């Protein structure tokens, strides 16, 4: 696949360098030994650090201290995202690899946080420093320093935007949460694009919570006002965060990327 081939391209030079070093080790007595317990350091400085290295090491920029997002618990997700958005390739493969992965990461980070806060969005005050922290962590692992422009990311991507529902309790009292989870907890990437079982459940849930607004927008027959369409789309993001809170980060990433692939294929 394109993604696996992309990763292959990234990894090949490192593997060749490792092979060269191993063949030279016998001849170079001064080459330092690496113990199995030590976290290996990257051979190329622009590549992401080893997943074994903690986010608190010196290669990671200092964070704002204002953001509650748990980057340590999502370390493997952040590493994968930084690789998919590697500086040299992010602009070239933005819509296919980097941006879908970045958007999924934002959804999962906020969704996982909601298990502690009970809220499926960040407030507008914290959204800006949190987005900056996310950028700093990814850039520190080799991602492009231009991700906001490449993927059109704004602090509002971490808030509820125009969606009127963000509290977990209100969300679960409004939608059929058990049906939503059953439809989306595991999807077949091929069948989903045709049958749209999960996509249909997400759209239904988003429509239900969009109608909770105190100022419902009118619809004239088949003509839907742009404001209403935007509200439903914003609510879809809230629905995805709720799903991400019910799944482990890896499974959530698989579901979100599968849904994105359906949209890319339609395009």
Image: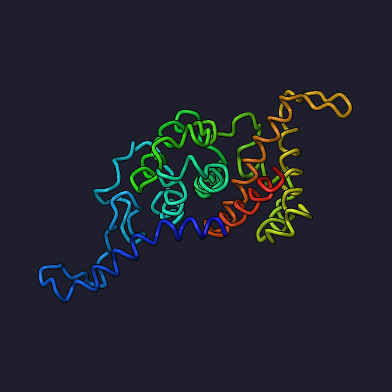
Q: Give the x, y percent position of residue 126.
A: 44, 32
In the displayed structure, 135 sits above or below 59; it is above
In the displayed structure, 236 sits above or below 188; it is above
Q: Give the x, y percent position of residue 40.
A: 27, 63
Residue visible at 74% across and 43% down? 203
Q: How is the image coloured?
A: rainbow
Residue visible at 47% across and 34% down? 148
Is 102 positioned to the left or the right of 257 in the image?
A: left
Quadrant (top left, top right, bottom left, bottom right) of the N terminus? bottom right
In the displayed structure, 79 sits above or below 120; it is below
Seen as rendered, the residue at the extreme bottom is 26
Tell which of 42 and 168 is nearer to you: 42
Seen as rendered, the residue at the extreme left is 30
Tell which of 183 and 138 is nearer to you: 138
Quadrant (top left, top right, bottom left, bottom right) of the C terminus? top right
Splitting the image into 4 quarters, where does residue 157 fall?
top right
Splitting the image into 4 quarters, where does residue 189 fall?
bottom right
Is 145 positioned to the left or the right of 233 in the image?
A: left
Residue visible at 66% across and 61% down? 186
Q: Give the x, y percent position of residue 53.
A: 31, 58
Is 1 positioned to the left or the right of 76 in the image?
A: right
Residue visible at 29% across and 57% down? 42
Is 158 positioned to the left or the right of 15 in the image?
A: right
Q: Give the x, y percent position of residue 91.
A: 48, 39
């Amino acid at each position: 696949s394109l993604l696996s081939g992309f990763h292959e391209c990234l990894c090949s030079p490192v593997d060749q360098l490792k092979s060269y070093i191993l063949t030279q080790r016998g001849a170079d007595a001064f080459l330092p030994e690496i113990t199995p317990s030590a976290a290996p350091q990257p051979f190329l400085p622009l590549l992401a650090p080893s997943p074994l290295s903690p986010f608190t090491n010196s290669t990671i920029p200092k964070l704002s201290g204002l953001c509650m997002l748990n980057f340590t618990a999502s370390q493997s997700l952040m590493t994968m995202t930084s690789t998919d958005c590697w500086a040299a390739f992010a602009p070239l493969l933005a819509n296919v690899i980097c941006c879908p992965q970045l958007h999924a990461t934002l959804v999962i980070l906020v969704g996982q946080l909601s298990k502690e806060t009970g809220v499926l969005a960040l407030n507008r005050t914290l959204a800006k420093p949190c987005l900056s922290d996310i950028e700093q962590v990814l850039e520190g692992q080799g991602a492009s320093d231009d991700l906001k422009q490449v993927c059109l990311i704004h602090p509002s991507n971490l808030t509820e935007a125009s969606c009127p529902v963000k509290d977990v309790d209100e969300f679960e009292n409004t939608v059929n949460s058990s049906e939503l989870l059953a439809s989306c907890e595991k999807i077949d990437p091929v069948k989903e694009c045709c049958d749209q079982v999960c996509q249909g459940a997400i759209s239904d849930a988003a429509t239900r919570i969009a109608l909770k607004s105190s100022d419902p927008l009118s619809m004239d027959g088949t003509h839907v006002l742009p404001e209403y369409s935007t509200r439903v789309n914003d609510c879809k993001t809230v629905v995805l965060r709720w799903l991400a809170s019910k799944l482990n980060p890896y499974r959530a990433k698989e579901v979100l990327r599968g849904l994105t692939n359906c949209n890319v294929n339609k395009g």
